[in-house]
Image (cartoon, rainbow, N blue to C red):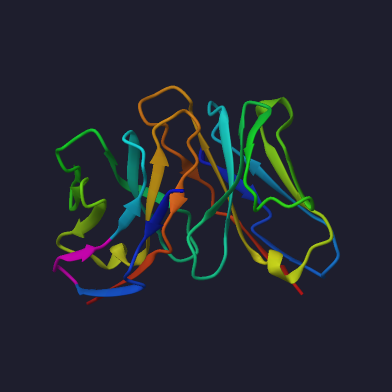
Amino acid sequence: AQTVTQSQPEMSVQEAETVTLSCTYDTSESDYYLFWYKQPPSRQMILVIRQEAYKQQNATENRFSVNFQKAAKSFSLKISDSQLGDAAMYFCAYRYGGSQGNLIFGKGTKLSVKP
Amino acid sequence: DTGVSQNPRHKITKRGQNVTFRCDPISEHNRLYWYRQTLGQGPEFLTYFQNEAQLEKSRLLSDRFSAERPKGSFSTLEIQRTEQGDSAMYLCASSLTRGFYNEQFFGPGTRLTVL
């Protein structure tokens, strides 16, 4: 069975600095997708960034980038120039590449941003 | 607002009562998912529909849970004879089946408290 592990329950970063959130996963599939979702307090979950497993190039979305290490089954999220609005729970998620696409989530990392 | 909506946002009930939640997906999305999120955990998949057909159910979905999606539009999730362990946030998400990776868009959730 596929599993997603986030080993950092909480992280803290100073405003304008860079922080990296860790995620590892376990799967025997070769075709899959990986995601980072952000869940602000009392607000709905939104997609931050995605990575297709077959792509070697790491995905980037503005201040957010990933370090995808397929052999190591590692998928970390780097947030550059952290802003107060980045404070939230961050969930790493896996989805099998087939058409049945439910997400498997990690337990999340709570990110605090200090002014 | 054309996002995923869920009602009610909060529900407090007594143990043994039945509750029903509603999810309205993004209008053109034909796939709809239900997840459950307990405190300190990531969302866990419950079930999903493609149009009106319920295609997959998690083992988490006990006999007391039932979900419907009549006419392939909104969906309801009913919990019969609620137990304290049912207290959680119930999240709904929707997506298209066409498209490259079928991003799931989440609603704000319904927070259930069973006393």
Image location of residue B31, percent across then percent down = 56, 31
Image location of residue B107, percent across then percent down = 54, 48
Q: Is residue B48 above or below residue A44?
A: above
Image location of residue B115, percent across then percent down = 77, 75
Main SS of the magenta part reads loop
Residue drawn 18% across and 53% down?
A63
Residue drawn 25% across and 52% down?
A75
Report whether A101 appears left or right of A56. right
Residue drawn 54% across and 54% down?
B44
Q: Is residue A24 above or below residue B104?
A: below
Q: How many marks?
A: 0
**Image quadrant where one finds the C terminus of chain A:** bottom left
Q: Quadrant of residue A114?
A: bottom left
Report whether A13 appears left or right of B98. left
Report whether B60 appears left or right of B45. right
Residue drawn 49% across and 70% down?
B40
Image location of residue B76, percent across then percent down = 72, 43
Residue A89 located within the stretch drawn in magenta: no
Q: Quadrant of residue B8?
A: bottom right
Of residues A107 and A36, which is closer to you in this image?
A107
Of residues A109 and B62, which is closer to you in this image?
B62
The single residue placed furthest to the top in the displayed view is B98
What span is colored magenta in the figure? A15-22
Q: Quadrant of residue A30?
A: top left
Residue A17 located within the stretch drawn in magenta: yes
Q: Is residue A89 above or below residue A70?
A: below
